[in-house]
Amino acid sequence: MARIEILLSDEEKTNLRDYCDTQGITASSMIRTLINQSSPGVANTNDFKELKTNKITIRLSDHNHHLLSTRAKSEGYLSQTNWASACILSRLHQEPVLSDDEINILRQSNRQLSAIGRNLNQIARVLNIEFRESDKITKGMIEMLSNRIDKHKDKVYKLLDKNRTRWSIDHEPTAE
């Protein structure tokens, strides 16, 4: 490997050392990363190591590890690994990744929508078959059903919007 020497002031050297310590990397690794990121077309990929397994290990400074742990807990993830995986997948695919709690909420949402659909089918059946007895279905009943649908849509929208915001996914609000 080629060797490069640079002259830094004492303050610059201290800043570089402090930054690298907080990131948990060496100065050489940091500079190599900067070069590869600033010129990806000519980046040296000879040092890139393909893994034999699907497991990736990363090292974090104590401060960053604490931040990761706090964020994973606050967002309802059961482990730091699950949160880190979701973060990486979100970045790779530019799509939100749902936590287990959010998936359960959407499953509950589907059950509620199914119940609402059954109610609508019963109303349609009464209106079509027993037209003379259609006074059994009041405007209030239909408004109640409409309100339930609106509340449900709001819950699902808020969940999805929170998820998009968490992963910094660009989106346009779709609230109706």
Image (cartoon, helix red, strand yellow):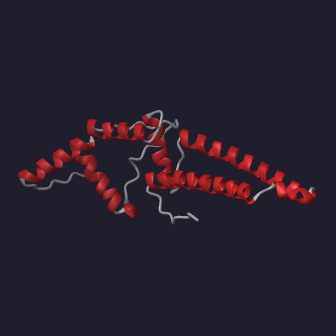
Q: Position of residue 15 (x, y in %)?
A: 14, 50
The residue shown at (86%, 58%) is 134
Question: In the shown orientation, is residue 43 left or right of residue 123?
Answer: left
Q: Position of residue 67 (x, y in %)?
A: 32, 40
Q: Quadrant of residue 131?
A: bottom right
Q: Quadrant of residue 56?
A: top left
Identify which residue, 129 or 55, lies in the foreground. Answer: 129
Q: Position of residue 107 (x, y in %)?
A: 65, 43
Identify which residue, 151 or 163, lies in the foreground. Answer: 151
- In this rendering, the answer to whether 86 lies above or below 157 is above
The residue shown at (74%, 60%) is 139
Q: Position of residue 106 (x, y in %)?
A: 62, 46
Q: Residue furthest top?
A: 78
Q: Residue furthest left?
A: 10
The residue shown at (66%, 55%) is 149
Residue 41 in view, yes or no: yes
Q: Quadrant of the C terminus?
A: bottom right
Identify which residue, 153 or 67, lies in the foreground. Answer: 153
Residue 1 in view, yes or no: no
Total marks shown come to: 0
Question: In the shown orientation, is residue 31 left or right of residue 144?
Answer: left
The residue shown at (17%, 49%) is 16
- In this rendering, the answer to whether 49 lies above or below 136 is above
